Amino acid sequence: MSKSPILSAADLHKTFKVSSHNYSTAVLTALGQVSLQLSAGETLGIAGESGCGKSTLAKIMAGLMEPDGGSVLYKGTKLSQLGQGERTLFRRKTQMIFQDPFSSLNPRMRIGDSIAEPLKIIGTSTVRQREELARIMAAVGLQSDAANRFPDEFSGGQRQRIGIARALAASPEILIADEPVSSLDISIQAQIINILLQMKTDFALSMMIVSHNLLVLRHICDRIIIMYLGEIVECGPASMLFQRCRHPYTEALIAAIPGLHIAAVPKSELLQDDLPSALSIPSGCRFHPRCRHAVDLCRHEVPKTVEYARGHSAACHLSNRLYD
Ligand code: SF4
């Protein structure tokens, strides 16, 4: 497996203007300064609570949203420097799967036509379209007669299969999935996860999976990035993060997983209060108002990201003291 980055981000920054209660405009910081790399053939998980910026990051990485600052690079070239043809190729080679696939399907279009649409756009012959449609539908576990039906005739799990099939029809290199199983029943979640794993192998994909469910990410990902209020606080191999995390926020997220009993203190003490508003990012370490280890330094100084083992880094002033 090649380790060269197929997709990377350098210092991504994104804000949104929002109306506040007194009709003035406020600035919400969705992404602080985010840099990451997705290697060819890798599955990278992005985790964090709702509002941590992970979905915004996914859309920017897929080229569906422009950052305010920083760059996304596809095979080493900034998206902003791609010519029109290269940009179209990037859009085709980087496909996104959404939490609610229904919203991305035309309710008046038969499923077969929806899935085959990317094939038509790239000029695939009608005969070949039929062959590819049959192959892709079989690969995601859809019956061939489903092609003549409409989106509202399918369950949530089947719609997600349709969303994956539609993405695969574009012959992608990169699949970016935003909470691909969070709206599904547990039993269906496992089926969709297995399909994604199988597709990664069969179609030689690199994948970025956004999820608040760390167990799903541990099962499916090579590496996991933990985000908090728009910044990366920890990043490392999935197994290493679970065996020996290096950030109190990661520790709290893992401890919150039902059935895992790793914490020596009550779970409620590991994560205090609710996520602060992204309209008012705390000074110093942005996690300090919720961190039970916070000291004065944490309130004033932004912690540097330090690499503790190969590919495993975290941003916490006290990481050595807490986890060595
Ligand atoms: Fe907690 Fe301080 Fe580490 Fe932030 S830098 S996670 S507040 S100990």
Image (spheres, grey):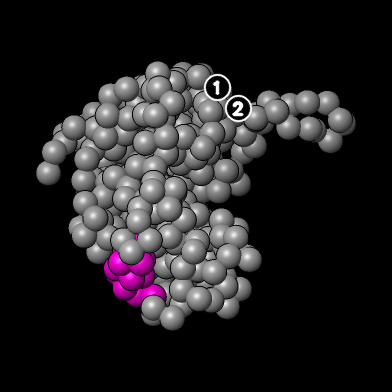
The residue drawn where x is 46% and y is 56% is 117
The residue drawn where x is 55% and y is 48% is 50
User: Would residue 87 be seen by someone viewing this image from the given angle?
Assistant: yes
In whole angstroms, how far apart are the C-alphas of marks 2 and 1?
A: 7 Å
Residue type at numbered disc 1? Asp
The residue drawn where x is 12% and y is 44% is 1
Quadrant of the frame with the C terminus:
top left
- Give yes or no for contact between labels 2 and 1 (Cβ–Cβ under 8 Å): yes
Q: Which residues are magenta?
A: 129-142
- Give the number of marks: 2
The residue drawn where x is 65% and y is 30% is 16
The spot of residue 195 in percent (x, y) is: 31, 67
The spot of residue 305 in percent (x, y) is: 33, 25
Q: Residue furthest left?
A: 1
Residue 154 sits inside the magenta stretch? no
Q: Which labelled disc corresponds to residue 68?
A: 1
The majority secondary structure of the magenta stretch comes to helix
Viewer-side residue, 49 vs 99: 99
Left or right side of 323 for 251: right
Viewer-side residue, 215 vs 111: 111
Badge 1 crowding class, 10 Å Cα cut-off, few under 14, some 14 to 19, many 20 or more, is: few
Left or right side of 226 for 201: left
Instruction: Kindly indicate the quadrant of the structure image that contains residue 217.
Output: bottom left
Badge 2 crowding class, 10 Å Cα cut-off, few under 14, some 14 to 19, many 20 or more, is: some
The spot of residue 29 in percent (x, y) is: 59, 29
Residue type at numbered disc 2? Thr
**Which residue does the numbered mark 2 point to in the structure image?**
15
